[in-house]
Amino acid sequence: MRAQTSVRATFRVVFRAATHKHKHKHKHKHKHKHKHKHKHKHKHKHKHKHKHKHKHKHKHKHKHKHKHKHKHKHKHKHKHKHKHKHKHKHKHKHKHKHKHKHKHETMSHPNTELIERFYTAFQQRDAETMAACYADDVVFSDPAFGELRGEEARDMWRMLVSRAQDFSLTFDSVEADERNGRAHWVAGYTFSQTGRTVVNRIDARFAFREGRIVEHRDTFDLWRWARQALGTKGALLGWTPFVQRAIRAQARKGLDLYRRRQRRT
């Protein structure tokens, strides 16, 4: 019995010693773990601070970019305004030109109207209105009649209008100022002496005084006229001075005969 009791006591002592060492070791390990955790927390805080700084830098960069964009937009608006002003000036110039053209078309010189009245009366075979456009001392000339003065010129138009057959007339390119003017006209008719059709293209020059025509000079190709009016003879010889003098003499003879008959009546 005593031996068993001694063994048990010895076992208890050993068990207690072992338990004590185990507890001590456990406590030691626990402290070690605690220190490890403490270090881990320390490292974690350090990392946290590092992240915080990184975010701060990122925000700073973001603000910098935002300012840059803002400046870019401002420049864009400035350019847009500049273009708008440029368009406005362009429209203003366009309107100015349009007004200038409108004035040019609507405002004609009185002498331009005088020429137009002369040829409009010719289209209507109104010889008296044509004669009224001339001054008393008017000078007229063309390749067929030569030079005519005063009443001779007015009687020439009276004769041509009264004898015209299949007559037509157009005129254009009328221009005039205070002293001078011009026009282009085309007369179509049948030449009574041969019965041939003539289309004569004529350039006219005018001089004015006090609202009337004081000088009227028509120019045209007399050889071309002779080819149409006289046929083969005119085509072969119409360019020669001899034939052209004969044409003028015949024209003046017809005018003189007309004027004598008019005086008798």
Image: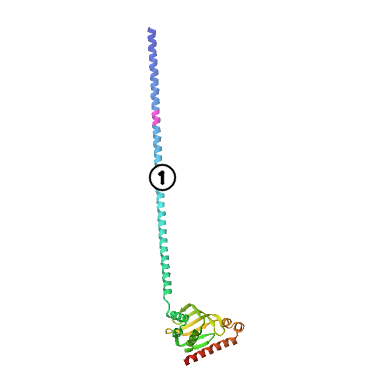
Q: Is residue 90 left or right of residue 165?
A: left
Could you tell me which residue is drawn at 42 percent across and 56 percent down?
76
x and y percent of residue 30 in the render? 39, 26
Nearer-the-camera pick, 160 or 10: 160
Colour theme: rainbow
Q: Quadrant of residue 112?
A: bottom left
Q: Residue furthest bottom?
A: 264
Q: Quadrant of the N terminus?
A: top left
Residue that lies at the very extreme toward the top in this rendered image: 1
- Number of residue marks: 1
Judged from the image, the secondary structure of the residue bearing numbered disc 1 is: helix
Residue displayed at 42% across by 72% down: 102
Visible in this render: residue 150? no
Task: Please tell me which residue is depicted at 39% across the width and 17% down the height of the picture.
Answer: 17
Q: Nearer the viewer, residue 175 or 80?
A: 175
Viewer-proximal residue among 219 and 68: 219
The main secondary structure of the magenta stretch is: helix
How many C-alpha atoms fall within 10 Å of the one at disc 1: few (<14), some, or many (≥20)?
A: few
Tell me, yes or no, whether the highlighted magenta stretch contains residue 30: no
Q: Is residue 31 left or right of residue 148?
A: left
Residue 34 lies in the magenta-colored region: yes
- Residue 19, x across and y down, in percent: 39, 19
Residue furthest out toward the right: 236
Magenta segment, which residues?
Answer: 33-37
Check the image and report above or below for 256 versus 33: below
Whether residue 80 can be seen here: yes
Q: Position of residue 196 (x, y in %)?
A: 56, 81
Q: Position of residue 80 (x, y in %)?
A: 41, 59
- Tell me the amino acid under the disc marked 1: His
Quadrant position of residue 242 = bottom right
**Residue of label 1:** 58
